[in-house]
Amino acid sequence: KQEVTQIPAALSVPEGENLVLNCSFTDSAIYNLQWFRQDPGKGLTSLLLIQSSQREQTSGRLNASLDKSSGRSTLYIAASQPGDSATYLCADRGGSNYKLTFGKGTLLTVNP
Amino acid sequence: EADIYQTPRYLVIGTGKKITLECSQTMGHDKMYWYQQDPGMELHLIHYSYGVNSTEKGDLSSESTVSRIRTEHFPLTLESARPSHTSQYLCASSVGVNTEAFFGQGTRLTVV
């Protein structure tokens, strides 16, 4: 059974700092990995999708990497802003039903 | 911008009532999913569909049922709501397996 772990569970940083969120998964036979953002009481907003054949994807201040062999992905956020405060979730897609398996998320707080 | 909509956003209902949570998408996606999320916990897949007239149960056992009569519509029904059903329900859709999954804003259900 696929398990996804996100470290740290919570992170508080001052505005302007660069930071890295970590995601690890137990089964490397995945199709892709997706990073999401969730604001309190809201749904999920897709940030980046990395295919299993790719090493990284970039969107603005966000850069996500994928190392399938080690079962790890990282989300790098450059020059963090208070508006980046949210819970960040990673999910991999795999298995016979192509489902997304989620981690518990990292709660990020960026202080002005 | 994801075109996937959930109604209602919030619902408070008495024990024993029948409820239907609506989910619609205008992107023509074949795959649709229902996830359940308790506060501070990860998302768990409760139902999914690969297309019209296709429905399957997910990993987390749920007393809810779903139907997929039209591509764009994937409602979830609870025949008799109980306090244990109190949770957030999130609907998602995707086309194929190598593309992004998009989520609705969620329905926060409280059964009293």
Image (cartoon, rainbow, N blue to C red):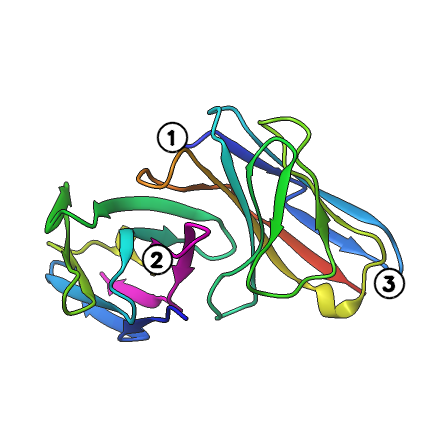
Q: Which residue is mark 2?
A: A91
Q: Are marks 2 and 3 in contact (CB under 8 Å)?
A: no
* Residue B80 placement: quadrant: bottom right
Share a chain, discs 3 and 1?
yes
Q: Residue at x 42, y 49 (%)?
A: A44
On the picture, is A48 further left or further right than B3?
A: left
Check residue A108 for magenta coloring: yes
Label 2 and label 1: CA atoms lie apart by 20 Å
Residue shown at 24%/64% (left/top)?
A28
Q: Does the image show residue A61?
A: no
Task: Choose mark 2 or mark 1, whichever is in front.
Answer: 2
Asked if labels 2 and 3 share a chain, the reply is no
Q: Quadrant of the N terminus of chain A?
A: bottom left
Mark toward the start of the polypeptide (3 vs 1)? 1
CA separation in Å, label 2 and label 3: 33 Å
Name the amino acid type tagged 3: Thr
Asked whether, in this view, residue A112 is left or right of residue B88, the answer is left
* Image quadrant in which the C terminus of chain A is located: bottom left
Residue B15's disc number:
3
Q: Amino acid at mark 1?
A: Glu
Q: Main secondary structure of the magenta part?
A: strand
Taking the image as drawn, is residue B43 in sight? Answer: yes
- The residue pinned by badge 1 equals B1
Q: Position of residue B39 (x, y in %)?
A: 54, 68
Q: Does B69 sit left or right of B90 as displayed?
A: right
Percent of width and height locating residue B2: 42, 32
Q: Residues within 10 Å of mark 2 (few under 14, many from 20)?
A: many
Q: Are marks 2 and 1 in contact (CB under 8 Å)?
A: no
The nearer-to-camera label among 2 and 3 is 2
Task: Give, as a single range, the part of the protein colored magenta.
Answer: A92-112
- Residue situated in front as seen by the camera: A95 or B31: A95
